[in-house]
Image (tube, rainbow, N blue to C red):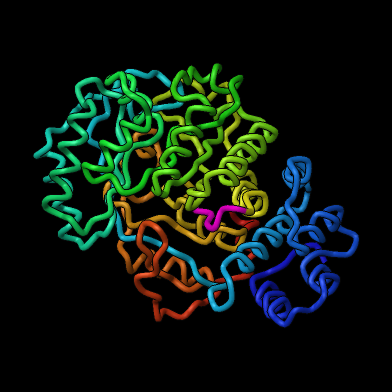
Amino acid sequence: MTCYDVALLESVSRQHEKELTVSVVLEKVLPGSSTISDIAERIYAGERITSADALRLYHHPDLLEVGALGEFVRRRKAGEGKEKFVYYIHNMHLNPTNFCVETCRFCSYANPGNKAYSWTVEEVLDEARKGAQLGINEIHMVGGLNPICDLNYYEEVMKAIKAEFPHLHLKAMTAVEIEYLANLEGISFEETLKRLVAAGLNSMPGGGAEIFDESVRTKMAVKKTPAHKWLEIHGIAHQMGMKTTATMLTGIGEAVEHKVDHMRLLRDQQDISGGFMCFIPLKCYYEGTTIADEVVEPTADDLLRDIAISRIFLDNFDHIKAYWIQLGVQLAQVALSFGADDLDGTIGEEKITHAAGAKTPLQLAKERMEELISTAGYTPVERDTVYNIRRVSTCAPSIVGALSDRVASLIS
């Protein structure tokens, strides 16, 4: 047997719930002759895989075998009764400014060729009102590094949003923005975070991590927030009781070794501070940049491996997100059978990825999110930012086509 489909994985999950032996599970998911069966045995035994194991999974020729392991880990992590749960959130994105003093070569959103803008506090509120009228429960706010938009500005913005919409969860300010604001004020990261929390900040997104490897960052002119500072800022946020997310950007000249090392650093930080809610593999889009000829664009195979291997390797992360804005809705659906358990959210108008050429929709209605999840064979679950369940959909899961055929159509 060289592949699996969703029905087979459902059978494996039922057998695992009945506590059958590892050897039986192996026989049902992977062929006995698979060259990664030793890794599978350690996974089923609950052991942590190594960086060397992760590299083997990246180089393993059978994508579906890797995906099968990712899906197994996802179901076990979900827990009894939640094996088919896939989460989404009703949210909106707010980007108060696209002016940025940094010049990362892969960025089109803050590209000097774009028309720069900086919203007033009232303009930010006007945008927030549009989302509130649609019933959102989260605002995701990030922007460029703009000296006009200093710490006082963001304190005013957050206080204004919370005054009018106290029920909305405010997920805002990447570690890059925290570093920039702290340096502008000449204060510590901790003091910067304390002031923003007092103003209404509830959690932090994981943007700005890019790839931690310095050789890649140097080629891409990424001068902002090196790995140790990015991890330090998230660690401080975790110590303050705040939850955050983590990301990895691919397609900017990295090798698989760089991706594994990036995830290892995240796993190490999670062991220490424990505040990461989920991991989000991202891909670069190149419209408006000059790097397309010197990098290799990630394939569907690459992106699905990132999902599956991060699910397996990041054993201390509860959730892996298939960010539909970047993957596209079809590949994001397939990624749910490779270990992802979250499609992100309804978004509202997304600007950053679309500025670089993404052709995905700007937003998706809740009904469409639930349709995407259910037709992939899973149960849609509306969540809040920190993964409290708001509602489990009554929409019955239904499988459209064999998974192997769907993967083949996307990677051919």
Majority SS type along the magenta span: loop
Residue 346 against residue 396 in the figure, above or below: above
Residue 411 visible to the viewer: no
Please tell me which residue lies in front, 356 or 82: 82
The magenta segment is 316-322
The structure residue drawn at horizontal position 11% and vertical position 52%, both measured from the top left corner, is 164
Horizontally, is 183 left or right of 10 in the view? left
The structure residue drawn at horizontal position 72% and vertical position 55%, both measured from the top left corner, is 66
Q: Residue furthest right?
A: 33
Residue 182 against residue 411 in the figure, above or below: above
Q: Can residue 317 be found in the magenta stretch? A: yes
Kindly indicate the quadrant of the structure image that contains residue 252. top right
Residue 100: x and y, percent?
31, 22
The structure residue drawn at horizontal position 66% and vertical position 35%, both measured from the top left corner, is 261
Horizontally, is 54 left or right of 81 in the view? right
Q: Can residue 185 be found in the magenta stretch? A: no
Horizontally, is 38 left or right of 293 in the view? right
